[in-house]
Image: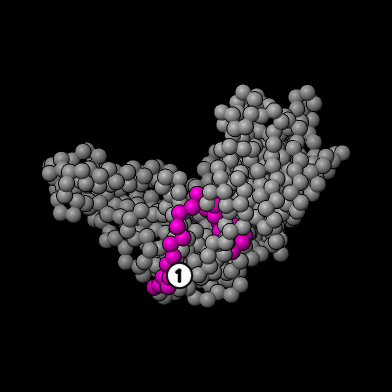
Amino acid sequence: MPQRDVRHKMMKISLGLLASILCSLSVPINAESTPPGDSKAPPLLDCEVTSQRDLGAWDDAFVCEDKDMLVLRRGDTLYTLLMGEGAQPKKIVTLDALSHTRIIACIPLGERVWLLLNSTETDAFAVEVNSAKVADFKIPNLTIPGSLAPRISSYVTVPHADAVILMIEGGDRETWPRDGNRPVYFWMSLTTGNVVRFPIGWDLNYFSMDQGVAVFRRTKEEAFRRQAISMQTGASLDSIPFGKANGYVPFNWTDTHAVKPIYMNRPKMGDQVFFRGLSVKGRAFLIDLDLDETFYLSQAMETDGFVGFRLRREGGSGGEPSPLWIVKAENPTSPESVPISVTNFALLKAGNSVICTTGHGVKKASSEAFFRASHDKSMWNVLDGVARLPELERDLAEKDYVQDQMTTRLIAGFGNQNPIVLCLYEHFRGDMRSYGFPNEEKIRGDMRSLVFPNEEKTVKIELWRRAVVVTSEGKRRMTGLFREGRVPDILWVHNSGILITGYTEGGKTGLTTYTLDLPHTAK
């Protein structure tokens, strides 16, 4: 093998090792291994790819999670791609302003579908894909694009009020209207596209429990008074119709998810917050977990009348293990605790779920996925019966220089059919002593077995991947995809079994769709 190829391969190996090391550092020291599932997994069947299509290169691609479609852009034209086998991209809107944009959100409301877009050349704006109506978010006296075009950095969608609030920042520094590039806020009607710009200097603070009212902090000149805004109209209210002691939804610019936390302040405890429940589609789920300390919402989702959520301790990260709670919308006061520590989960139909836990393997650094049935609380390991990498000798696996870790990624399906989850596993094994820059002459065989001077035992560098689809009914199918090569930059799965992958290079994204042969699931 030419020396150039050897160096290239060694660089790829080193990068893989580095990524695995960084992942292992994020695992809490006290993470405990979850015992194997208490039920036998159903038969694992092959999942055939019945068709594959190359969709070509695109300037932008975005999945509309609440719809059965993608939105694509090529130049100044938007297209939709419905999730049906053989469907072709359909041209919907052509506007000059689209040429330099990125889609950051797709917000459906009935027959309307709004896209929020950032541009490198103009103000941020929204476009309704069926009517081509445009809503601009203009900031007075701002030079466009100037040193930098303004961008939508966060948004809060309130579908039951037919509205969205947007936070815009990052524009031209010399002409930006606020010190420190602090944001400017807008309200937009999802029904009419009408826009209200709030006064410069106002900052979004929190919402009522049902998110029907937004509360802003006003400017210094207004003595920092708070102002309530109706989410239905964007108009000011005479007073704030609730108190923070009863419960409120905080504004968090990093959180654009549909399910929001409800916190409360307790008497004589100042601004310390306590978890009170969840705000879901205009309904406040008040949940009493009898918590005497501050916990923040780490992850939440709603599916088929069930809501799942995890909390994190104050100062903790969202990826650390924590208990999972599941509540029924019809009886939110009786949450069910899943008695294990979870790092990720996906909620399926009828309260079933796929949960991811860490703390596995000799070094307690690997993760596994389990299917959990809601009706009888049984669990089984998604990889039950799957041949894996052979186990290392324990004395070798425990060595500090040996990296032996499996990571599990859950990719939840989108669309209006019964939910599915794609579980993507990657097990990396290698000898960290490869960072000692071994002489290329010491590389033998297939270039993966590294021999080091004065060492009797070495670990072959291996990368093992598997992809398993799990359905809402608890059936599992193994695909042959992603076992070799680079994992796609884009990986979306529609609940019908259409898989979309994409690789980005030179500003273009090449898309491919695969139709997976899955058991039929009714809507």
Residue found at x 45% / y 49% = 508
Q: Amino acid at mark 1?
A: Leu
For label 1, the SS is: strand
| Residue 207 can be seen in this image | no
Q: Is residue 227 magenta?
A: no
**In this figure, which colouring scheme has been used for the structure?**
one colour
Residue found at x 27% / y 54% = 462
From the top left corner, tell me how far across and down residue 315 is, in percent.
Answer: 55, 38
Count up the numbered dots. 1
- Is 59 situated left or right of 286 in this image? left
Magenta residue span: 46-73
Q: Sort mark 1 into few (<14), some (14-19) or many (20+) by Cα contacts within 10 Å.
A: many
- Is 400 situated left or right of 270 in this image? left
From the top left corner, tell me how far across and down residue 158 is, in percent.
Answer: 71, 51
Of residue 330 and residue 80, the one placed in the foreground of this image is: 80
**Please, which residue is most extreme toward the right here?**
238
Residue found at x 53% / y 65% = 88
Where is mark 1, residue-wise? 516
Of residue 292 and residue 279, the one placed in the foreground of this image is: 279
Question: From the viewer's perspective, is residue 477 above or below residue 463?
Answer: below
Of residue 189 and residue 397, the one placed in the foreground of this image is: 189
Question: From the viewer's perspective, is residue 233 above or below residue 270?
Answer: below
From the top left corner, tell me how far across and down residue 317 is, in percent.
Answer: 52, 43
Residue found at x 55% / y 74% = 521
Which quadrant would the C terminus be assigned to in this image?
A: bottom right
- Is 361 situated left or right of 125 in this image? left
| Magenta stretch prevailing secondary structure | strand
Q: Is residue 47 magenta?
A: yes
